[in-house]
Image (tube, rainbow, N blue to C red):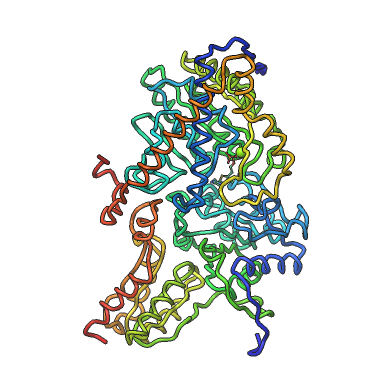
């Protein structure tokens, strides 16, 4: 992107749609497959209009058969295609977990490196819309446990626009997690925005006092918290992980070396989580650089409740981040 | 398995007929109000209306006894009401109040009430079927003459779990009444675009389950089929499968531009509105007059008003209780 490139107003949803459209145009092997991606226009309207433009072969509606169509995506990828499989939400991906974990993640290895699987699976994740315990969980951290797959979490317009193509060019299966509260996010994006690299975390706000490490749906809340903290004289750095597997440990450690304090913010649960992994890596790589133990702000250890006040209380919030950092800075500022 | 046609009963007991009509009106008005309250932001999350399909639940639930069990989907307000879950507690649940049948933890999609043996409220398509199989297995093992009724949509038929459950039900001769609510659409996916064989009763028949299609717009046909099937199930003949052919008049949930179906199709089906047609039939037969009808409407309206007042005056569960019910250390009072 040139510095004076023209900008357009765009939503996260539209950026994602542009990315899919672009991929369909660039590579005839690409097709989109999933529930209600065609006639319905996508359950979050991401693929709206694509059926009309590309036809039912390439915008393929599937029955409610998650295991079968995810597995079919794997097979098609093994047989020369570049499928984009959409699962409505991460909760329903559990019906396809067998195909993802036992096939997509293992076949390259089991075949001694002969057969790779260039597959992209997109799904919505996260809470915040009062959808209760079967539609709200953040299980991307689970997937990040699995060797053989890559896990992306685009949190910005540029990443929504740019990660898909790079993921499609990857020889191995890539899972893309789109937080449900991001689709309506609107902002300016360069008209010539295109593919972005998917191996590095990004510093979204530079700071010197504390590293706030997050990704996906909590990036916005974290930046908001950093701004509030700035008003009270605390200069927080915000690190957007972007990719949960493989984790960019180097960028995390770089940031912590500068700030000597770290808070991990993750909408997943705390126990056995990606936040635990990040905390462990900081401990392993920067223990003597730390002024304080790493803190974590995660979702409460309970299935997501429906009632709004309980859901809000269950989730990481900007106010919790501010309070945690303020407590950490007390006497150390 | 031969398909048995439904039998028309011209001589319906007047009191019973009016009760059936009243049940349907109860569901319809309750949900119309729920839709209004959704627009007023009193109810949030997803709200799936059963409007158009009332005859199915009204007919089917009549065949059940208090000791039986019900497993339903996220489109379950009507089933819960008929099962005897109070309108008050359902409304309060949708408000997210702790007086709700699931204490505001579940919302519209997750109505539960152990007292009336109403076991959800399952929002993973097909997810209730294995539970129902387990309920029936328990009853069989305990030599109890009970029926477990499981409601699920046409969309569920595409899931692997559906087929696994049909086989188990038949193989183990389980006392389960399988109620398929075929409203011709799974969200935006028309049945004919999801199934190679759209005659869903044949699928169950292929597993050696007694199965037949039922006119789901005719409450009498629905009740009769359910009574006959429940009798067979209760007497130990194994599972029965009823394919109720019906139609949803409203959007899938509250957000749905309905690009996937023709307005004329909806209008055609509305001519078969289960309430209007039955009301006409009873009026023509001289069973129902305006005064009767007014009484039904008035009673229903006051029940709903009372439910709203109850929900409005309900209380929010304290945030300190957030992590309750992840484990059963304590039970709701
Ligand atoms: C396993 C799973 N996949 C997808 C969804 C999203 N979803 C919710 S309802 C629905 C349509 C289900 O249609 P059907 O079974 O016919 O029931 P209906 O809504 O018509 O009553 C879909 C796709 C889900 N809840 N669960
Ligand atoms: Mg349906």
Please give left or right for residue B227 compared with residue A71 in the image.
left
Q: Position of residue A234 (x, y in %)?
A: 33, 85
Please give left or right for residue B309 compared with residue B283 in the image.
left
Quadrant (top left/top right/bottom left/bottom right) for the C terminus of chain B:
top left
Q: Position of residue A216 (x, y in %)?
A: 49, 68
Position of B148 relative to A319 (above/below):
above
Q: Position of residue B155 (x, y in %)?
A: 61, 39
Of all residues, the one furthest to the left in this rendering is: A331
| Quadrant in which ligand 2 is drawn | top right
Position of A78 relative to B179 (above/below):
below
Please give left or right for residue B67 compared with residue A248 in the image.
left
Quarter of image, res B148: top left
Residue plotted at (62% across, 14% down): B285
- Towards the viewer: A199 or B182: B182
Quarter of image, res A330: bottom left
Q: Position of residue B82 (x, y in %)?
A: 45, 28
Of all residues, the one furthest to the front in this rendering is: B291
Please give left or right for residue B201 compared with residue B66 in the image.
right
The answer to whether residue A272 is visible is no
The answer to whether residue B45 is visible is yes
Residue plotted at (30% across, 47% down): B325
Of all residues, the one furthest to the bottom in this rendering is: A3
Quadrant (top left/top right/bottom left/bottom right) for the N terminus of chain B:
top right
Total labels: the figure holds 0
Position of A89 relative to A261 (above/below):
above
- Towards the viewer: A266 or B275: B275
């Amino acid at each position: 992107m040139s510095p004076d490139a023209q900008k357009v107003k765009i939503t996260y949803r539209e950026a994602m749609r542009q990315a899919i459209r672009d991929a369909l145009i660039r590579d005839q092997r690409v097709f989109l497959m999933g529930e209600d991606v065609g006639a319905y226009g996508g359950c979050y309207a991401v693929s709206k209009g694509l059926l009309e433009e590309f036809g039912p072969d390439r915008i393929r509606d599937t029955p409610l058969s998650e295991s079968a169509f995810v597995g079919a995506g794997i097979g098609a990828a093994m047989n020369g295609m570049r499928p984009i499989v959409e699962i409505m939400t991460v909760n329903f991906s559990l019906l396809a977990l067998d195909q993802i974990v036992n096939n997509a993640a293992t076949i390259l290895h089991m075949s001694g490196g002969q057969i790779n699987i260039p597959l992209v699976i997109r799904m919505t994740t996260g809470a915040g819309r009062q959808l209760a315990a079967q539609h709200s969980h953040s299980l991307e951290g689970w997937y990040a446990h699995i060797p053989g797959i890559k896990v992306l979490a685009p949190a910005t317009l540029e990443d929504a626009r740019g990660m898909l193509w790079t993921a499609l060019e990857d020889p191995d299966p890539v899972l893309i997690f789109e937080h449900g509260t991001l689709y309506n996010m609107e902002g300016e994006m360069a008209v010539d925005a295109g593919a972005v690299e998917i191996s590095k975390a990004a510093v979204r706000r530079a700071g010197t006092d504390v590293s706030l490490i997050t990704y996906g749906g909590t990036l916005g809340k974290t930046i908001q918290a950093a701004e509030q903290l700035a008003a009270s004289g605390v200069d927080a750095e915000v690190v957007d992980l972007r990719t949960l597997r493989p984790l960019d440990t180097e960028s995390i450690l770089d940031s912590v070396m500068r700030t000597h304090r770290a808070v991990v913010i993750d909408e997943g649960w705390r126990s056995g989580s990606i936040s635990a992994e990040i905390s462990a890596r900081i401990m392993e790589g920067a223990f003597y650089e730390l002024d304080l133990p790493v803190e974590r702000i995660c979702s409460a250890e309970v299935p997501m409740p429906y009632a709004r006040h309980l859901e809000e209380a269950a989730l990481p919030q900007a106010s919790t981040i501010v309070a945690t950092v303020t407590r950490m800075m007390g006497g150390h500022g | 398995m031969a398909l048995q046609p439904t039998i028309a009963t011209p001589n319906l007991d007047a009191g019973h007929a009016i009760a059936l009509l009243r049940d349907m009106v109860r569901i319809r008005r309750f949900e119309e109000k729920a839709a209004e309250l959704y627009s007023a932001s009193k109810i949030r999350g997803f709200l799936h209306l059963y409007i158009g399909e009332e005859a199915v639940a009204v007919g089917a639930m009549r065949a059940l006894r208090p000791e039986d069990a019900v497993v339903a989907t996220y489109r379950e307000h009507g089933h819960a009401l008929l099962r005897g879950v109070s309108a008050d507690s359902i409304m309060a649940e949708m408000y997210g109040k702790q007086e709700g049948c699931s204490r505001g933890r579940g919302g519209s999609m997750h109505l539960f009430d152990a007292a009336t043996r109403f076991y959800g409220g399952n929002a993973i398509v097909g997810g209730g079927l294995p539970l129902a199989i387990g309920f029936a297995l328990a009853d069989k093992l305990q030599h109890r003459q009970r029926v477990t009724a499981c409601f699920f949509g046409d969309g569920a038929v595409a899931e692997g779990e559906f087929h696994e459950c049909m086989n188990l039900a038949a193989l183990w001769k389980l006392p389960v009444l399988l109620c398929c609510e075929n409203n011709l659409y799974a969200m935006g996916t028309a049945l004919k675009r999801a199934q190679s064989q759209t005659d869903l009763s044949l699928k169950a028949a292929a597993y050696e389950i007694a199965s037949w299609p039922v006119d789901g717009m005719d409450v009498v046909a629905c009740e009769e089929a359910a009574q006959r099937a429940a009798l067979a199930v209760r007497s130990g003949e194994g599972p029965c499968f009823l394919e109720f052919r019906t139609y949803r008049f409203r959007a899938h949930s509250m957000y749905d531009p309905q690009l996937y179906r023709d307005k004329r199709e909806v209008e055609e089906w509305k001519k078969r509105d289960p309430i209007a047609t039955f009301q006409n039939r009873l009026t023509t037969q001289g069973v129902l007059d305006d005064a009767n009808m007014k009484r039904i409407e008035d009673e229903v309206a006051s029940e709903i008003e009372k439910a709203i007042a109850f929900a409005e005056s309900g209380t929010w569960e304290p945030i300190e209780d957030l992590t309750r019910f992840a484990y059963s250390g304590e039970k709701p009072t």
